[in-house]
Amino acid sequence: MENYSGKWLKNPQFIKFEMVGAVACVTMNRPQSRNALSNELLLELRDALLEADDREDVNVVLLAGEGKDFCAGYDLVAAYGVDQVDPDGNKISYRKSSANFDNDCWSMERFQSLPNIIYEMHKPVIAKIHGNCLAGGTDLAFRCDMLVASETARIGFPATRANGSPPAHMWTYHLGPQWAKRLLMTGDVLLGRDAAKLGLVLDAVPAEELDDFAMELAQRVALVDPELNSAHKRIVNMSLEQMGMMTMQRLAVEMDARAHLGTGPRRLGFRKDMAESGFKQALANRDGPFGDGIVRLRTDR
């Protein structure tokens, strides 16, 4: 159902919102951009999640992506700072994230506050991951209460090879310190089947079974009264907070801003490639030395 209008969500352009029983299916709908996270998409996603959390006929949210990918990352092509004009025709200049450390932190804090609604809402959110779930896609998915994936989904943060560190850090909480370092220090990706073995996702199934599997799980969760699931969610989330999770999110933003100031050869090389050859070539040069970048667990050999 496109162009849905409710109390919170008004005529969305980049989000689909539809009901299947007591399950609110919220789908990111920028398939031509592989559901890259723009400010506009995240604003609509926040409103869709608030809509679901407020509606009494919703017990659980199933979050997905339209097209070939769940989410291929942040929209790096779109400008972070946009000039606007006031009623008198005077140009209004907004913060440029690249201007200085504080502006970078401020921009990321505002941007990350949009998907943080997943933590804050009372109803559970299940992420259904297929295709690529990369960079910003992981920042979004790892906030969800449960994650299910296709066995062939690609999950990782290749941008850590040259661009920065995840501004939302749930890697240690899902994987433990060694695997968090292994993935962040190489930018390699896990296939869904291996992500399930390591506990990064709840379970993984063949791609053709993912829709039914995710919906069956969502409907099973939806059998429990919302106020009970709210209590369960908030208890577990408060346990994470006692482990320092919310403080770590703020530190992750500041460490990412610090990383953006780097002057190492890979960081500078990426900037040079972006300026001279464009985004696609910069990605090719950044990731080429790593081959296919897929982690293969030795337990399968």
Image (spheres, rainbow, N blue to C red):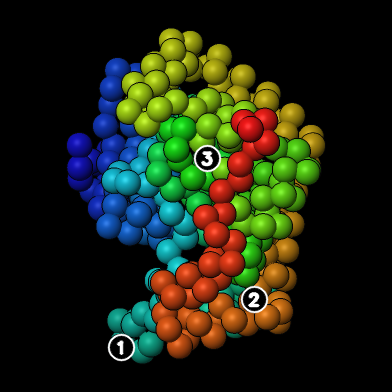
Q: Amino acid at mark 2?
A: Arg
Q: Do the numbered discs 1 and 2 sit on residues whose CB atoms are within 8 Å?
A: no
Q: Is residue 187 visible?
A: yes
Q: Residues within 10 Å of mark 3 (few under 14, many from 20)?
A: many
Task: Give left or right: position of 83 versus 138.
Answer: left
Find the distance from the CA under tag 1 to the CA under tag 2.
Answer: 42 Å
Find the distance from the CA under tag 3 to the CA under tag 2.
Answer: 26 Å
Q: Earlier in the sequence, mark 3 or mark 2?
A: 3
Q: Which mark is residue 89?
A: 1
Task: Give left or right: position of 145 versus 243.
Answer: left
Instruction: Name the residue rendered at 71%, 79% in the picture.
Output: 264
To which residue does mark 2 refer?
266
Q: Where does the N terminus fall, quadrant-wise?
A: top left
Instruction: Indicate the position of residue 262 as horizontal and vertical percent values.
Output: 71, 77
Q: Residues within 10 Å of mark 2 (few under 14, many from 20)?
A: some
Q: In the image shown, does 85 or 180 lie closer to the viewer?
A: 180
Q: Amino acid at mark 1?
A: Gly
Q: Which mark is residue 191?
A: 3
Instruction: Name the residue rendered at 43%, 33% in the picture.
Output: 150
Instruction: Name the residue rendered at 36%, 53% in the picture.
Output: 35
Q: Nearer the viewer, mark 1 or mark 2?
A: 2
Q: Earlier in the sequence, mark 1 or mark 3?
A: 1
Q: Earlier in the sequence, mark 1 or mark 2?
A: 1
